[in-house]
Amino acid sequence: MRFTHYGAALGAALALLLGTTTTAAALGAADTAPAPRASYFGQLENPYSGECLAADEDTGEVFTEACDPDDEEQVWHYDTHDRQLVNFASVECLTAGEPGWWVTTQWCGFTADQRWNYEATSGRFVSQSNNHCLSRQWFGPRVLTYECGDSAQSWHFIPR
Protein backbone atom coordinates (compact mmCIF):
# COMPACT_ATOMS: atom_id res chain seq x y z
CA MET A 1 0.00 0.00 0.00
CA ARG A 2 1.15 3.49 -0.81
CA PHE A 3 0.88 5.01 2.72
CA THR A 4 2.57 2.28 4.77
CA HIS A 5 5.68 4.40 5.35
CA TYR A 6 3.55 6.68 7.54
CA GLY A 7 2.87 3.87 10.05
CA ALA A 8 5.87 4.50 12.33
CA ALA A 9 5.30 8.26 12.37
CA LEU A 10 1.61 7.77 13.12
CA GLY A 11 2.43 5.31 15.92
CA ALA A 12 4.93 7.73 17.45
CA ALA A 13 2.44 10.61 17.21
CA LEU A 14 -0.28 8.54 18.89
CA ALA A 15 2.14 7.50 21.63
CA LEU A 16 3.04 11.15 22.23
CA LEU A 17 -0.64 12.11 22.43
CA LEU A 18 -1.40 9.22 24.79
CA GLY A 19 1.58 9.99 27.01
CA THR A 20 3.47 6.76 26.45
CA THR A 21 7.12 6.45 25.55
CA THR A 22 7.81 4.87 22.19
CA THR A 23 10.92 4.22 20.14
CA ALA A 24 11.11 2.91 16.60
CA ALA A 25 12.25 -0.48 17.95
CA ALA A 26 9.38 -0.63 20.39
CA LEU A 27 6.62 0.17 17.90
CA GLY A 28 4.27 -2.76 17.89
CA ALA A 29 5.98 -4.29 20.93
CA ALA A 30 4.93 -4.13 24.56
CA ASP A 31 5.78 -0.69 25.95
CA THR A 32 6.85 0.20 29.46
CA ALA A 33 4.07 1.48 31.69
CA PRO A 34 3.59 5.25 31.35
CA ALA A 35 3.83 7.51 34.36
CA PRO A 36 0.51 8.16 36.09
CA ARG A 37 -1.39 10.82 34.20
CA ALA A 38 -4.28 13.00 35.24
CA SER A 39 -6.40 15.41 33.26
CA TYR A 40 -8.61 18.18 34.62
CA PHE A 41 -11.33 20.02 32.74
CA GLY A 42 -13.53 22.77 34.16
CA GLN A 43 -13.43 26.08 35.94
CA LEU A 44 -10.57 27.09 38.24
CA GLU A 45 -11.91 28.73 41.38
CA ASN A 46 -9.74 30.79 43.70
CA PRO A 47 -11.03 30.13 47.26
CA TYR A 48 -9.45 33.40 48.45
CA SER A 49 -11.75 35.47 46.24
CA GLY A 50 -14.48 32.92 45.44
CA GLU A 51 -14.01 33.88 41.77
CA CYS A 52 -12.98 31.88 38.72
CA LEU A 53 -9.98 32.25 36.43
CA ALA A 54 -11.00 33.68 33.05
CA ALA A 55 -9.26 34.83 29.88
CA ASP A 56 -10.46 37.38 27.35
CA GLU A 57 -10.22 35.48 24.09
CA ASP A 58 -9.66 38.70 22.11
CA THR A 59 -6.95 40.36 24.22
CA GLY A 60 -5.38 37.43 26.10
CA GLU A 61 -5.87 39.25 29.41
CA VAL A 62 -6.27 36.87 32.37
CA PHE A 63 -8.34 37.82 35.41
CA THR A 64 -10.83 36.49 37.95
CA GLU A 65 -14.57 37.11 37.91
CA ALA A 66 -17.77 35.69 39.38
CA CYS A 67 -18.01 32.03 38.48
CA ASP A 68 -20.47 31.36 35.66
CA PRO A 69 -20.82 27.73 34.48
CA ASP A 70 -21.98 28.97 31.05
CA ASP A 71 -18.92 31.19 30.44
CA GLU A 72 -16.49 29.35 28.14
CA GLU A 73 -13.77 31.93 28.90
CA GLN A 74 -13.68 30.39 32.42
CA VAL A 75 -13.16 26.81 31.25
CA TRP A 76 -9.64 25.36 31.36
CA HIS A 77 -7.98 22.04 30.58
CA TYR A 78 -4.88 20.84 32.43
CA ASP A 79 -3.04 17.61 31.77
CA THR A 80 -0.25 16.44 34.08
CA HIS A 81 1.72 15.15 31.09
CA ASP A 82 2.05 18.33 29.00
CA ARG A 83 1.53 20.66 32.01
CA GLN A 84 -0.26 23.33 30.03
CA LEU A 85 -3.37 25.21 31.10
CA VAL A 86 -5.42 25.67 27.93
CA ASN A 87 -8.36 28.07 27.82
CA PHE A 88 -11.41 26.48 26.18
CA ALA A 89 -12.72 29.65 24.49
CA SER A 90 -9.46 30.87 22.95
CA VAL A 91 -7.63 27.52 22.71
CA GLU A 92 -4.56 29.39 23.97
CA CYS A 93 -2.20 28.54 26.81
CA LEU A 94 -1.74 30.37 30.09
CA THR A 95 1.63 32.10 29.77
CA ALA A 96 3.77 33.43 32.61
CA GLY A 97 5.85 36.56 32.27
CA GLU A 98 8.53 37.74 34.63
CA PRO A 99 7.75 37.32 38.36
CA GLY A 100 5.21 39.95 39.37
CA TRP A 101 3.99 40.52 35.81
CA TRP A 102 0.51 39.70 34.55
CA VAL A 103 -0.08 36.30 33.00
CA THR A 104 -1.71 36.16 29.58
CA THR A 105 -2.93 33.57 27.12
CA GLN A 106 -0.95 33.02 23.94
CA TRP A 107 -0.68 30.46 21.16
CA CYS A 108 0.49 27.19 22.68
CA GLY A 109 4.10 26.12 22.28
CA PHE A 110 5.99 23.77 24.52
CA THR A 111 7.98 26.49 26.27
CA ALA A 112 8.70 26.74 30.00
CA ASP A 113 6.59 29.90 30.36
CA GLN A 114 3.53 27.83 29.36
CA ARG A 115 4.24 24.85 31.60
CA TRP A 116 2.79 24.71 35.09
CA ASN A 117 3.36 22.17 37.84
CA TYR A 118 0.10 21.57 39.70
CA GLU A 119 0.48 20.82 43.40
CA ALA A 120 -2.80 19.07 44.11
CA THR A 121 -2.45 19.23 47.91
CA SER A 122 -1.95 23.01 48.03
CA GLY A 123 -3.87 23.81 44.84
CA ARG A 124 -0.96 25.85 43.52
CA PHE A 125 0.18 26.16 39.92
CA VAL A 126 3.93 26.81 39.82
CA SER A 127 5.44 28.24 36.63
CA GLN A 128 8.34 26.21 35.26
CA SER A 129 9.88 29.37 33.80
CA ASN A 130 10.15 31.47 36.96
CA ASN A 131 9.27 29.04 39.80
CA HIS A 132 6.60 31.46 41.06
CA CYS A 133 2.95 30.68 41.74
CA LEU A 134 -0.15 31.68 39.81
CA SER A 135 -1.63 34.40 42.04
CA ARG A 136 -4.75 36.50 42.13
CA GLN A 137 -3.90 40.14 42.69
CA TRP A 138 -4.81 41.17 46.27
CA PHE A 139 -6.58 44.40 45.30
CA GLY A 140 -8.13 43.53 41.94
CA PRO A 141 -9.08 40.84 39.48
CA ARG A 142 -5.79 40.57 37.52
CA VAL A 143 -3.68 37.42 37.77
CA LEU A 144 0.13 37.28 37.94
CA THR A 145 2.99 35.08 39.10
CA TYR A 146 4.37 35.82 42.53
CA GLU A 147 6.61 34.18 45.11
CA CYS A 148 4.81 31.09 46.46
CA GLY A 149 3.35 31.11 49.96
CA ASP A 150 0.16 33.19 49.77
CA SER A 151 -3.48 32.12 50.30
CA ALA A 152 -4.47 33.87 47.04
CA GLN A 153 -2.44 31.24 45.15
CA SER A 154 -4.72 28.28 45.76
CA TRP A 155 -6.94 27.09 42.90
CA HIS A 156 -9.31 24.16 42.64
CA PHE A 157 -11.13 22.69 39.67
CA ILE A 158 -14.89 22.76 39.42
CA PRO A 159 -15.47 19.86 37.00
CA ARG A 160 -17.52 20.57 33.92
Image: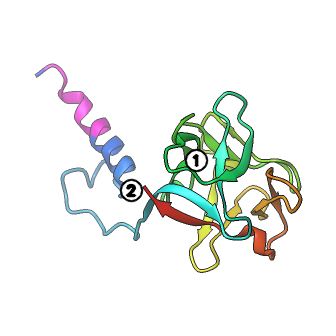
Q: Secondary structure at mark 1?
A: helix
Corner quadrant of residue 51? bottom right
- Give the spatial CA distance, label 2 vs label 1: 26 Å
Q: Is residue 149 magenta?
A: no
The span picked out in magenta is 2-10
**Does residue 92 appear left or right of residue 58 in this picture?**
left
Q: Secondary structure at mark 2?
A: loop
**Does residue 108 appear left or right of residue 160 in this picture?**
right
Q: Nearer the viewer, residue 24 or 55?
A: 55
Q: Nearer the viewer, residue 124 or 137?
A: 137
Tell me where residue 12 appears, x and y as whole percent.
Answer: 33, 44
Q: Amino acid at mark 2?
A: Gly
Residue drawn where x is 62% and y is 72% of the image: 123
Residue drawn where x is 77% and y is 64% of the image: 131
Q: Earlier in the sequence, mark 2 or mark 1?
A: 2
- Name the residue that disc number 2 marks: 19
For residue 24, the mark is: none
Q: Is residue 59 above or below residue 101?
A: above
